[in-house]
C-alpha cells in the first residue's frame, strides 16, 4: 500500500497536479511530519507514526496547514491523511482555522494493528484513496472498565490520576483542536495560579468541556502526557455523548456544523 | 448535626428570577438552603461556573431559565438545554453524581412552582449527602487502577 501511495504522490508532483505533499517522513530520529516537494524525497514517505499531521504551532497558535497556506497561497497541497488527520482538517475548516481550498486529501486507512494500538474508533478517512476500512470498530477496554466502576471509585480514580498532573500544558499544546488565543486553562478565573497539582478537577475540566463537541479522538493529549494520565477517556465519553444526543461526531463530516455552536431546524430562530 | 445542603441557583433575569421574586412578594416560604445568583440568561451559565460553584462548597447547582420558546434572547435557553446534559455526563464520568446539577424552566408567573421545586430539590440533595468535591482528601492514599 505504501508503494501505491508513493507512486500516486510522485505522479501528482510530476504532472504538477500538486506542488507539495504533506505526510509522515522517515527520519533518523523516527517518523515525523514533513513536506515533500520532489519525487526523490517521496521515497522517505512512510505510513507509520501515531502523531497527527495537523497540529497547532506555538506561539502563533496557528495550525501548521494554515501557516503553509499563508506562505504559499496558490500552492496545491496534497495531504496523506489518516482518519484522525482528516477529522482534524474537517473540524478546523468548519471552525475557520484553515481553508480546504486547493488541498487534496489522500486518504489512507489504518490496519487493524494500528487501530488497536491507537484505540481508534474510526481508523479511516472519508476521502479514502488507499487501503480498506475496518468494518468492525475497535473497542476501548479501558473506557468500558471505567464506565463499570461505581461513582465513588471513579472519583477516587480521577483524584489519583489527576493528582499526578505537573501542569505542563502538554495535553493542550499537543491537541490539534486547542487553537484558542486565550486559554482558560491559563486564566486565573478558574485555575488558581501556583497550585501544584492543579485544582481537582477544574484544570482538566476546562479542556474537557471546551472539547466536548470538538474532540476528534486522536489521542494526542494522552500521548503527550509525561505523567501517563488517561486524559482521553473523559473526552472520549463526552464525544460519544454528543454523538448519541445530537448525532454529531466532530470531524467526520466536512459540512455539518456542531449542534452546540449552531441553531438547528425547529429551534425558534431557525430560518427555513 | 444533620446535613443541610447548600444549593447555588442560577436564575435567568427575565423569567426565573422574576418567578422567585413573585414567590418572595407573595410571602411564600421555601427552604433557606438556596443561594440565588441572577444571570441575564440561563445560556450564560458556563459549565465552568457550575464546576466553580461545586468546588467552592455548593452541594448542588440549580439552573433555571425561561421555558423553551420564551427566551428573551430567542435562543439562549436552547443552548442551555444542549449544554447542561453534556455537563452532567462529564460529572458522571468524573465520579460526581449528575443529580447535583439540575436544569429547570420556571416562568415569571410560576412563583409557586419555584417554591415546590426548591423544596423538592433540597430534599433530594439532603438524601444524596454532602458534595464529595468539598472537604480535604489526600489523592495519593488510594491509587485505584483500571
Image: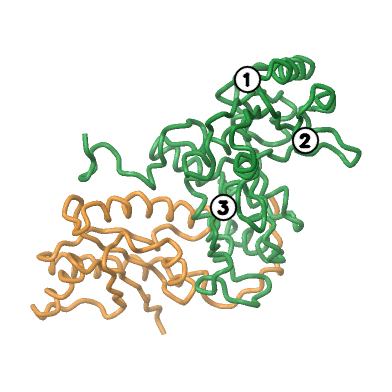
Chain colours: A green, B orange
Q: Which residue is mark 3?
A: A179
- The picture places residue A257, in percent across and down from the top left corner, at 40, 38
The chain carrying label 3 is A
Q: Are marks 2 and 3 on the same chain?
A: yes
Question: In the displayed structure, does residue B19 sit left or right of residue A260?
Answer: left
- In the displayed structure, B97 sits above or below A54; it is below
Real-space CA distance between mark 2 and mark 1, rounded to the nearest whole angstrom:
18 Å
Q: Nearer the viewer, mark 2 or mark 1?
A: 2
Question: Few, some or many C-alpha atoms within 10 Å of disc 2 (few <14, some 14-19, many ≥20)?
Answer: some
Q: Quadrant of residue A169?
A: bottom right
- In the displayed structure, B34 sits above or below B43; it is below
Assign a secondary structure to mark 3: loop
Q: Which residue is mark 1?
A: A133
Q: Residue at x 39, y 68 (%)?
A: B60
- Lower sequence index among marks 2 and 1: 2
Assign a secondary structure to mark 2: loop
- Which residue is nearer to you in this view: B62 or A42? A42
Q: Residue at x 73, y 30 (%)?
A: A114
Image quadrant holding the N terminus of chain B, namely bottom left
Q: Which residue is mark 2?
A: A49
- The picture places residue A26, in percent across and down from the top left corner, at 85, 33
Q: Are marks 2 and 1 on the same chain?
A: yes
The chain carrying label 2 is A
Q: Nearer the viewer, mark 2 or mark 3?
A: 3
Real-space CA distance between mark 2 and mark 3, rounded to the nearest whole angstrom:
23 Å
Assign a secondary structure to mark 1: loop
Q: Are marks 1 and 3 on the same chain?
A: yes
- Lower sequence index among marks 2 and 3: 2
- Lower sequence index among marks 1 and 3: 1
- Which residue is nearer to you in this view: A32 or A64? A64
- The picture places residue A64, in percent across and down from the top left corner, at 65, 44
Amino acid at each position: 500500500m505504501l508503494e501505491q501511495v508513493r507512486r500516486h504522490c510522485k505522479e501528482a508532483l510530476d504532472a504538477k497536479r500538486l506542488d507539495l505533499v504533506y505526510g509522515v517522513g522517515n527520519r533518523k530520529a523516527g517518523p515525523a511530519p514533513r513536506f515533500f516537494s520532489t519525487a526523490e524525497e517521496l521515497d522517505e514517505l512512510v505510513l507509520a507514526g501515531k502523531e497527527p499531521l495537523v497540529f497547532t504551532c506555538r506561539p502563533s497558535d496557528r495550525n501548521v496547514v494554515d501557516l503553509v497556506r499563508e506562505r504559499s497561497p496558490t500552492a496545491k497541497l496534497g495531504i496523506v491523511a489518516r482518519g484522525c488527520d482528516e477529522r482534524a482538517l474537517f473540524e478546523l475548516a468548519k471552525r475557520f482555522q484553515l481553508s480546504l481550498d486547493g488541498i487534496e486529501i489522500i486518504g489512507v486507512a489504518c490496519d487493524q494493528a494500528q487501530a488497536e494500538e491507537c484505540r481508534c474508533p474510526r481508523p479511516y478517512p472519508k476521502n479514502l484513496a488507499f487501503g480498506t476500512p475496518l468494518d468492525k470498530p475497535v473497542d476501548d477496554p479501558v473506557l468500558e472498565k471505567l464506565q463499570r466502576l461505581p461513582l465513588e471509585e471513579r472519583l477516587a480514580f480521577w483524584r489519583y490520576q489527576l493528582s499526578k498532573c505537573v501542569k505542563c500544558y502538554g495535553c493542550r499544546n499537543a491537541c490539534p483542536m486547542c487553537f484558542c488565543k486565550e486559554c482558560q486553562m491559563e486564566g486565573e478565573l478558574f485555575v488558581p495560579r501556583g497550585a501544584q497539582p492543579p485544582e481537582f478537577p477544574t484544570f482538566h475540566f476546562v479542556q474537557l468541556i471546551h472539547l466536548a463537541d470538538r474532540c476528534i479522538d486522536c489521542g494526542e493529549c494522552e500521548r503527550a502526557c509525561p505523567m501517563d494520565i488517561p486524559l482521553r477517556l473523559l473526552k472520549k465519553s463526552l464525544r460519544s455523548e454528543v454523538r448519541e444526543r445530537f448525532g454529531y461526531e466532530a470531524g467526520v463530516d466536512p459540512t455539518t456544523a456542531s449542534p452546540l455552536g449552531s441553531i438547528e431546524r425547529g429551534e425558534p430562530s431557525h430560518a427555513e | 448535626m444533620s446535613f443541610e445542603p447548600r444549593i447555588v441557583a442560577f436564575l435567568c433575569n427575565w423569567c426565573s428570577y422574576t418567578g422567585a421574586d413573585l414567590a418572595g412578594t407573595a410571602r411564600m416560604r421555601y427552604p433557606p438552603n438556596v443561594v440565588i445568583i441572577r444571570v441575564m440568561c440561563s445560556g450564560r451559565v458556563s459549565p465552568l461556573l457550575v464546576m466553580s460553584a461545586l468546588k467552592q462548597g455548593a452541594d448542588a447547582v440549580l439552573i433555571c431559565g425561561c421555558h423553551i420558546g420564551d427566551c428573551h434572547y430567542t435562543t439562549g435557553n436552547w443552548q442551555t438545554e444542549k449544554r447542561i446534559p453534556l455537563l452532567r455526563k462529564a460529572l458522571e464520568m468524573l465520579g460526581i453524581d449528575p443529580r447535583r446539577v439540575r436544569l429547570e424552566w420556571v416562568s415569571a408567573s410560576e412563583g409557586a412552582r419555584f417554591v415546590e421545586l426548591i423544596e423538592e430539590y433540597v430534599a433530594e440533595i439532603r438524601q444524596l449527602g454532602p458534595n464529595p468535591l468539598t472537604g480535604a482528601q489526600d489523592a495519593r492514599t488510594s491509587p485505584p487502577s483500571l
